[in-house]
Image (cartoon, rainbow, N blue to C red):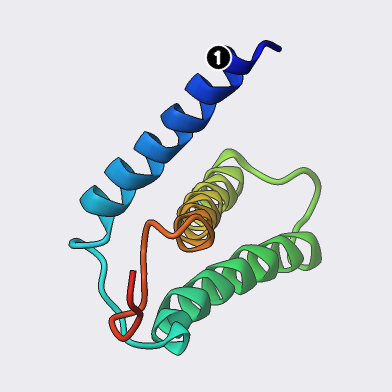
Amino acid sequence: MDRQYKRQLLVLEQQRRTINRDTINPEISFDKIEDVDPILSMVAEVRASYLKALFDLANNREGMPGAREIEQLRELRLTYRELVEATNALETAIERGYITLAGEVD
């Protein structure tokens, strides 16, 4: 890679960080990292529900699971996956400095 190209990539990265921080940070505010605990608890509860449903399905079935049972399991999986993706997006935003704790100085 030539120097100009590398410089352009660095400028692009800096612009991306600034725009994301300026857009996201005003929308999301918390004082300490423990303020995300309700999010983490919600994800854990949904994960537990999904896994419990699987165990319940296996332990209470006669033959193959029915379409209704599979649909219920699918809904739990979709909910779980969506919450995990959202939590991962939050983690990335924090890692990249798009969201700062209220007491932090930029």
> What residue lies at 26% left-to-right and 66% top-to-bottom?
28
Residues 15 and 80: in front is 15
Q: Position of residue 34 (x, y in %)?
A: 46, 88
Residue 53 sits in which quadrant?
bottom right
Q: Is residue 27 above or below residue 35?
A: above
- Could you say which is closer to the camera, residue 92 or residue 87? 92
- Quarter of the image with the N terminus is top right
> What residue does disc 1 label?
4
Q: Would you place residue 28 above or below residue 67 in this image?
A: below
Vertical side of 79 occupied by 66: above or below: above
Give the image location of residue 15, x and y in percent: 35, 36
**Quarter occupied by the C terminus:** bottom left
**How many numbered badges does the structure rendering display?**
1
Residue 67 position in % (x across, y down): 58, 39
Q: Between residues 88 and 57, which one lies in front from this camera angle?
A: 88
The residue most toward the front is 3
Q: Is residue 73 left or right of residue 1?
A: left
Q: Residue at x 56, y 45 (%)?
A: 74
- Left or right of 104: which side holds 94? right
Q: On screen, 99 above or below 88? A: below
At horizontal 25% and vertical 74% (from top left) the residue drawn is 29
Say which residue appears at 77% left-offset and 43% top-offset. Answer: 64
Element carrying mark 1: helix
* Mark 1 residue type: Gln
Q: Which residue of the protein is positioned furthest toward the left in this rendering?
A: 26
Q: Position of residue 13 (x, y in %)?
A: 47, 35
Give neighbour class at mark 1: few <14, some 14-19, many 20+ (Cα, 10 Å).
few
**70 horizontally vs 78: left or right:** right
